[in-house]
Image: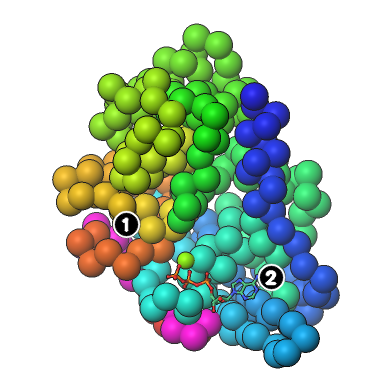
Amino acid sequence: MPQEFEQMTDSKIQSNDFTQSRYPRNSTGGGAILAESVEMVINSKQQRLQILKEIDWEIQKGDIEILMGPSGSGKTTLLSILAGLLTPTAGSVYLLGQEITRMSRTELAWFRRHHIGFIFQDFNLFPALTAIENIEAALNVKGIRGKSARKEAQALLEQVGLGDKAKQLPRDLSGGQKQRVAIARALTGRPQVIMADEPTAALDSHSGHLVMELLRGLAKEQGCTVLIVTHDPRILDLADRVAYMEDGVLKY
Ligand SMILES: Nc1ncnc2c1ncn2[C@@H]1O[C@H](COP(=O)(O)OP(=O)(O)OP(=O)(O)O)[C@@H](O)[C@H]1O
Ligand SMILES: [Mg+2]
């Protein structure tokens, strides 16, 4: 079960045929998340599509940063690159002072598993596992097993207001409930960096508020760095900073 889960998450790692970064690799990596001259270009037979243009961005430890922008502007692409799920065409990414764009696949998988909690736009839950098993599987790959995994998984479900849904399969949960299971799963193993793609999109205002308070608590009490892509104006007040993406250009 854990192995399947690992394969599922690792299948999200993509690489491309493009060259490695042409930029110097001597950054000290000051912030918790640092992007230097990140670009993403996709070449098809018909056209050359520049999805991200020269992105330089630094997010400090313990901050909650929100990234907004129109549909198709490149937000998910940038988030995937910052989380090491996608390799940029050019540029460097440092997380917690380490250059993830130089890591091997194995190093990166280990680093991601131990330091990054990622909440996917499409939840990416394992359909054959119940809510609690989805979280336990994530704990298992982080080395937490048996009764302690079950106890921690239940506690995480309760934190997101789903203590009574532990035994339900994803197909029997609403969109907002699935989203909260995905959030609970991203919090397993206490990651230092949490990245979330539209984490409140399927949530009513009460659940959205609960999730944001939870993320804010992790940032302010435990020093987690939280990066959230959202269209949801209700959560802007909880951010330390807001950045905007338009046509692959980042403004902040
Ligand atoms: N593998 C790919 N091949 C071709 N085009 C792609 C690929 N991945 C992304 N794109 C294009 O890149 C652009 C940015 O996509 P991305 O998913 O990052 O947007 P987004 O800002 O997250 O949008 P949304 O708010 O709708 O989620 C889009 O025009 C998309 O069609
Ligand atoms: Mg997106």
- State the colouring used for the structure image: rainbow
**Residue at coordinates 35% horizontally, 35% vertically from top-left?**
173
How much space separates mark 2 and mark 1, taking CA atoms? Answer: 27 Å
**Residue at coordinates 46% horizontally, 25% vertically from top-left?**
130
Q: Give the labeled residue for mark 2.
A: 88
Question: Residue 119: x percent and y percent?
Answer: 47, 49
Task: Using the image, determine if residue 43 lies above or below residue 157.
Answer: below
The amino acid marked with disc number 1 is Ala
Mark 2 packing: few (<14 Cα in 10 Å), some, or many (20+)? many
Marks 2 and 1: which is nearer the front? Answer: 1
Question: Residue 184: x percent and y percent?
Answer: 41, 35
Q: Dividing the image into 4 quarters, which one contains the N terminus?
A: top right
Is label 2's Cβ within 8 Å of ligand 1?
no
Q: Dividing the image into 4 quarters, which one contains the C terminus?
A: bottom left
| Highlighted magenta segment, given as a residue range | 237-248
238 is within the stretch colored magenta: yes
Front residue of this view, candidates 201 and 109: 201
Kindly give the residue lying farthest to the front in the view shown: 171
Task: Using the image, determine if residue 236 lies above or below residue 149.
Answer: below
Front residue of this view, candidates 23 and 143: 143
Q: Which mark is residue 201?
A: 1
**Residue at coordinates 69% horizontally, 48% vertically from top-left?**
11
